[in-house]
């Protein structure tokens, strides 16, 4: 306990000064440098969008695209057609190897660094709720417990990776990532891959994968970026990134982020403020040993403190969360780049200390994981991705002795292009679980970009399984007789571009069925396994229009129907979700970004009163946010942004507040290579 206390005390001492240090750094660097920003030029920040899937239809000549990794791209995953768009994203998550978006059969959304800078929001969840198929529910202000769903399934079915590190917490009630703590001041790209991905990522990727790549040096030399912000609820936020790249491709970057706010009462009927503090360090780098060998690392550290209310009433509750994670490895390229091998090991530990007067408790979770992945290109139309993952998860608490499980998982996937424009993948995985034995999963995808057109068809099918979490098995409310959940999912869709991809629409239908769902019995306060099938289905619609080179409008709509085995609706999941976006640069040096979010037809479960537990309707709501920026110096932009501009009084979880009208002012900068 002494080591844990002293570690957190040090982190809080650093946190208390980080905002002032960041602000001073911003001022010093802006005054010292009057050049264009490198990592995200201000002139580009207003021309961003959150596309559902970029269709490769531009008539521009093919150009190389820089990826946030030194791993070479297999020929079969490259779009070399005459219509290929050189600015379209390269995604890694879909096939665990860099793949042009036009050749991905799964439904994927990409949020770029320009998108993030255009809005200047703080947390990952702020951007995810704008993605079709994703819904976010909070129980208070920033830092409060967040439930996020993808295609109807909550976070324990979604794999979240940051620079390849799995940050999910084995000490939680379910093994999932605590999204409420993930700030994006260090983020270069976010990939949201939807549909069952258990074949490539394991059992907790039934609904999909969210993959973040942090910032890195894009050109040889030094780069710096960051910013500072102050606003409503006495909220301070700062971030600073510094990095360096060598001419041979070696690079390194480090980021520090901090946020502190007085907050507001999380309880709907409460009066006392619930504050939040977050200090995050992150870093990544790679060193090119030779033309064939590159070694790399990634690291992340979090220290957060949240004041929170429970059961919808004022409480003096506090939880401290400390997490450290790291990953090291090497990429080895053989046979002239045809055979690329990745070897890596990663570790993570999380400590949570909670005070709910007069009680205290603690929960610890840890993970160690070894990885091997190889990508072999037979020719320009055929490649295979294969590998093996091994991981051990551990959990203990004030109430429970340490428990752990091991999982060994070989996998393989073929990628083939039998005819021009048609890319097929097929793969399988065998998970050997130390408690539940062997489970097989498989995945098939297809993407067809119709030649000489702007039409792309895509489809995917996959199976999955989720083993019960250690908490579901061994806690006082758990049950060691549980069996793993199994799932089947599929989707099919089409994307259509017009006028050289200046305009575009897309539609995707999805369905996910889960057998033997594990859920919590709110009356008896124990976990239970529901016989039968939990059914999720819906439609995702997208549209965008590039009215001018600097004016873009976009829209994304999701209809989701989720029913439990008894036929009743799932809670905290709206049927209708509509996200709207507008980005423009009306005059030189001035940028505008406007976003709207409409959520309708949701229900929540409440005691009315105890022991009667019933489902009640949650009121519909519309949230409007906007940001106006002005480039005061080359590479430096001052801005004002507002959230919930209509001051909507809304809830996403009955009994808990959400922010009213909030306004923030700040500056962001990006300085070029020296």
Image (cartoon, rainbow, N blue to C red):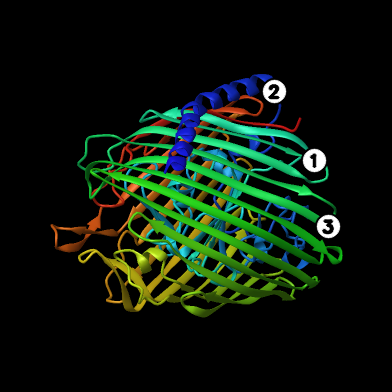
Q: Residue 86 at x, y = what percent?
A: 73, 53
Q: Residue 180 at x, y = what percent?
A: 42, 47
Which residue is painted at 31% across and 51% down in the image? 652
Which label sits on residue 292? Answer: 3
Residue located beneath label 1 in the image: 246
Residue 144 is drawn in which quadrant? top left
Secondary element at tag 3? loop
Q: In the orientation shown, which residue stands out farthest toward the front? A: 2
Dot 3 surroundings within 10 Å: few (below 14), some, or many (20 or more)?
A: some
Above or below for 100 versus 666: below
Which residue is painted at 32% across and 58% down in the image? 572
Q: Are marks 1 and 3 in contact (CB under 8 Å)?
A: no
Q: Is residue 329 left or right of residue 10?
A: right
Dot 1 surroundings within 10 Å: few (below 14), some, or many (20 or more)?
A: some
Secondary element at tag 1? loop
Q: Residue 549 at x, y = what percent?
A: 64, 42
Q: Is residue 619 left or right of residue 350?
A: left
Secondary element at tag 2? loop
Inter-mark Cα distance, 2 to 3: 37 Å
The numbered mark, 1 or 3, whose residue comes first in the sequence reads: 1
Inter-mark Cα distance, 1 to 3: 17 Å
Which label sits on residue 22? Answer: none
Is residue 223 visible in the rendered structure shown here? Answer: yes
Disc number lying in front (2 or 3): 3
Residue 494 is drawn in which quadrant? bottom right
Above or below for 355 versus 56: above
Q: Residue 416 at x, y = what percent?
A: 72, 75
Residue located beneath label 2 in the image: 33
Q: Are marks 2 and 3 in contact (CB under 8 Å)?
A: no
Dot 2 surroundings within 10 Å: few (below 14), some, or many (20 or more)?
A: some
């Amino acid at each position: 306990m002494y080591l844990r206390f002293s570690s957190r005390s040090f982190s809080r001492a650093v946190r208390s000064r980080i905002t002032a240090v960041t602000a001073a750094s911003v001022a010093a660097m802006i005054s010292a440098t009057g050049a264009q920003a490198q990592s995200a030029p201000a002139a580009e920040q207003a021309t961003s969008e959150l596309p559902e899937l970029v269709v490769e239809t531009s008539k521009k000549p093919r150009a190389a695209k820089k990826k946030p990794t030194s791993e070479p791209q297999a020929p079969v995953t490259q779009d070399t057609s005459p219509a290929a768009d050189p600015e379209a994203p390269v995604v890694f998550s879909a096939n665990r190897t860099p793949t042009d978006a036009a050749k991905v059969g799964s439904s994927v959304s990409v949020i770029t660094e320009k998108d993030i800078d255009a809005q200047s929001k703080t947390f990952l969840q702020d951007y995810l709720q704008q993605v079709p198929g994703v819904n976010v529910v909070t129980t208070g202000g920033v830092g409060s417990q967040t439930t996020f769903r993808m295609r109807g399934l909550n976070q324990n079915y979604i794999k979240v990776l940051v620079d390849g590190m799995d940050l999910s917490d084995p000490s939680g009630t379910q093994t999932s990532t605590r999204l409420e703590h993930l700030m994006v001041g260090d983020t270069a790209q976010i990939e949201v891959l939807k549909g069952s991905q258990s074949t490539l990522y394991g059992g907790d990727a039934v609904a999909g994968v969210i993959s973040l790549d942090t910032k890195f040096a894009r050109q040889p030399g030094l780069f710096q970026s960051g910013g500072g912000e102050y606003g409503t609820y006495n909220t301070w936020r700062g971030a600073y990134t510094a990095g360096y790249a060598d001419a041979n491709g070696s690079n390194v970057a480090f980021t520090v982020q901090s946020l502190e706010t007085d907050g507001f009462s999380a309880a709907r009927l409460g009066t006392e403020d619930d504050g939040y503090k977050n200090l995050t360090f992150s870093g990544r780098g790679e060193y090119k040993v030779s033309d064939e060998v590159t070694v790399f690392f990634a690291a992340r550290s979090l220290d957060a403190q949240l004041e929170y209310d429970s059961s919808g009433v004022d409480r003096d509750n506090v939880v401290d969360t400390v997490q450290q994670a790291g990953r090291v490895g090497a990429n080895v390229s053989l046979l002239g780049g045809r055979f690329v091998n990745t070897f890596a090991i990663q570790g993570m530990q999380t400590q949570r200390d909670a005070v709910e007067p007069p009680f205290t408790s603690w929960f610890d979770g840890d993970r160690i994981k070894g990885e091997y992945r190889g990508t072999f290109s037979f020719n320009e139309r055929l490649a295979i991705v294969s590998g093996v993952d091994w991981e051990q998860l551990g959990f203990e608490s004030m109430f429970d002795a340490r428990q752990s499980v091991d999982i060994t998982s070989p996998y393989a996937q073929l990628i083939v292009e039998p005819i021009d424009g048609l890319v097929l993948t097929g793969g399988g995985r065998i998970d050997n679980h130390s408690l539940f034995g062997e489970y097989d999963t498989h995945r098939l995808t297809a993407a067809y970009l119709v030649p000489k057109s702007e039409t792309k068809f895509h489809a995917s099918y996959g199976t999955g399984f989720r083993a019960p979490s250690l908490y579901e098995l061994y806690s006082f409310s758990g049950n060691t007789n549980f069996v793993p959940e199994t799932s089947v999912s599929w989707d099919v869709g089409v994307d259509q571009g017009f006028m050289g991809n200046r305009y575009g629409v897309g539609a995707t239908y999805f369905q996910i069925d889960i057998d033997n769902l594990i859920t919590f019995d709110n009356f008896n306060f124990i976990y239970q396994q529901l016989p039968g099938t939990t059914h999720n289905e819906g439609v995702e619609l997208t549209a965008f229009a590039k009215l001018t080179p600097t004016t873009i409008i976009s829209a994304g709509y999701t209809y989701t129907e989720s029913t439990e085995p008894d036929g009743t609706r799932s809670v905290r999941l709206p049927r209708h979700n509509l996200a709207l976006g507008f980005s423009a640069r009306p005059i030189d040096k001035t940028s505008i970004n406007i976003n709207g979010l409409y959520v309708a037809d949701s229900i929540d479960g409440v005691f009315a009163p105890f022991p009667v537990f019933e489902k009640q309707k949650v009121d519909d709501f519309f949230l409007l946010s906007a940001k106006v920026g002005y480039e005061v110096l080359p590479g430096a932009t001052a801005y004002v942004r507002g959230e919930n501009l209509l001051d909507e009084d809304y809830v996403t979880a009955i009994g808990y507040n959400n922010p009213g009208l909030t306004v923030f002012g700040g500056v962001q900068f990006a300085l070029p290579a020296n």
